[in-house]
Image (cartoon, rainbow, N blue to C red):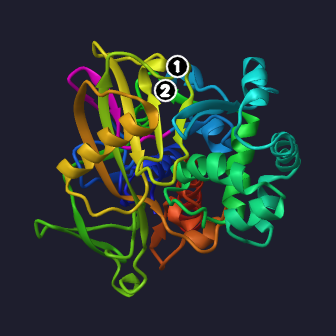
Amino acid sequence: MEKKSTEIAIIGAGVSGLIAAIVLEQNGYSPTIYEQSKSVGGRVKTDIVDGYQLDHGFQVLLDAYPMAKKYLDFEALDLQKFLPGAYIFKNNKSAVIGDPLRSLGLLFPTLLSNIGSFTDKIKILRLNLTVKQKTNEDIFNEPETSTLVFLKAQGFSEQIIRDFFKPFFSGIFLEPNLETSSRMFQFVYKMFGSGSAVLPVAGIGAITEFLSSKLNKTTIEFNSTVVSCTDGSIEFSDGKKIQTDYTIIATDASPLVPNLRKQKLSWHSSDTLYFTCKTRKIKKPLIGLIADPESLINNIFYHTSINTLNKGDDELLSVTVVKKHFLSEYELIQKVKEDLNTYCDITIERYIKHYEIKRALPKLNDFRYTLSPSETRLTERTFLAGDYLLNGSLNAAMTSGEMAAYGLLEVI
């Protein structure tokens, strides 16, 4: 087939779909992306509300991700760094714990904090060194346990697990009990220890806007909801049908492909609420963790502790909830305000917006680091991409998009 006449459809303009399109363009093709919303990004988006920059859920980029280094321009994104640590609220007190090897200013606060024993702190540094020595492939080839079982096997105390590891990694894995695979824990721990948690100055959505800006020969059709996909044919919610030569499904494929409908994906959900405050309780760019088990809140962050492209008049605070609840939006807002006051001594000035993210991260059983191009092939002319094929990370989303494009290129 001639490259110019080959019809390649990509379903979904999230990270995976955009990476697939970039790879296809690099090889001379001009795909069309069909996106059900009105903008690129999928789960990686940023809104501007009343002059404030609101990410769809509290998200960070780990700049040690190999695929981020490959496909993103860190300088162009003007990445703002978090300090390597956390500000922990417990029993109406607060403490700082961090990695003094990467930020000397955290040495004395960490040593003097009442979070964990001195032995725990030594073990944290030792674990840092241990996972850094492993390749990413080695980590994902290890036998899987839960993160909680892994931490206990490493000899960490119940206190450090409860007060630091649980709230910190619950905010990453979006589940409160550290049931996520020990492979994923070690990978994320290694990425934190090997680089920095960062945010583009324009918010997390700048990542997908940047990837989109790299596309010169790709057409993106917005407000295009796909309801069915078979080899050579795509049907949309408005009844329109199109013919394609090849298709990459860069979203959850189970509702779209007839023989996958029984293999429905399960998802972790979360709530992120944004508020303004007159002052910042946490002055430095540190994530705040609420270690009291009675609190509904898991973590908080003052986005005004880093530079942002869009700034309102007051301090911007995001609050993340990962525990299951059955509260109405009004009840949730009131409960979060109450918890902020009770556990953090934070007074809210104004509520801005609530993001209920029902499909935040895929629930997976077998966590993998990578896959071969041929493994992305579902049928003769249909390929799959998405972080759910590997692990719930931006790195996995990029890897799967790249591999799906390579898989298609092998057979075209």
Q: Mark 1 points at which residue?
A: 78
Mark 2 closeness class: few <14, some 14–19, many ≥20 residues within 10 Å: many
Left or right relative to 309: residue 127:
right
Can residue 210 be seen in the rendering of this structure? no
70 vs 294, nearest the viewer:
294
Helix, strand or loop for disc 2: strand
Q: What stretch is highlighted in magenta?
A: 47-59
Residue 158, image x, y percentages: 72, 57
Residue 402, image x, y percentages: 57, 53
Q: Which residue is drawn at 82% across and 27% down?
A: 101
Q: Is residue 252 magenta?
A: no
253 vs 311, nearest the viewer:
311
Badge 1 amino acid = Asp
Left or right relative to 243: residue 367:
right
Say how many tags the image has: 2
Q: Residue at x 32, y 75 (%)?
A: 255
Can residue 49 be seen in the rendering of this structure? yes
Q: Residue 200 carries which label?
A: 2
Extreme-front residue of the structure: 91
Badge 2 amino acid = Pro
The answer to the question of whether label 1 and label 2 lie on touching residues, with beta carbons closer than 8 A, is yes
Q: Earlier in the sequence, mark 1 or mark 2?
A: 1
Mark 1 closeness class: few <14, some 14–19, many ≥20 residues within 10 Å: some
Extreme-left residue of the structure: 238
Helix, strand or loop for disc 1: loop
Q: Does the magenta stretch include residue 57?
A: yes
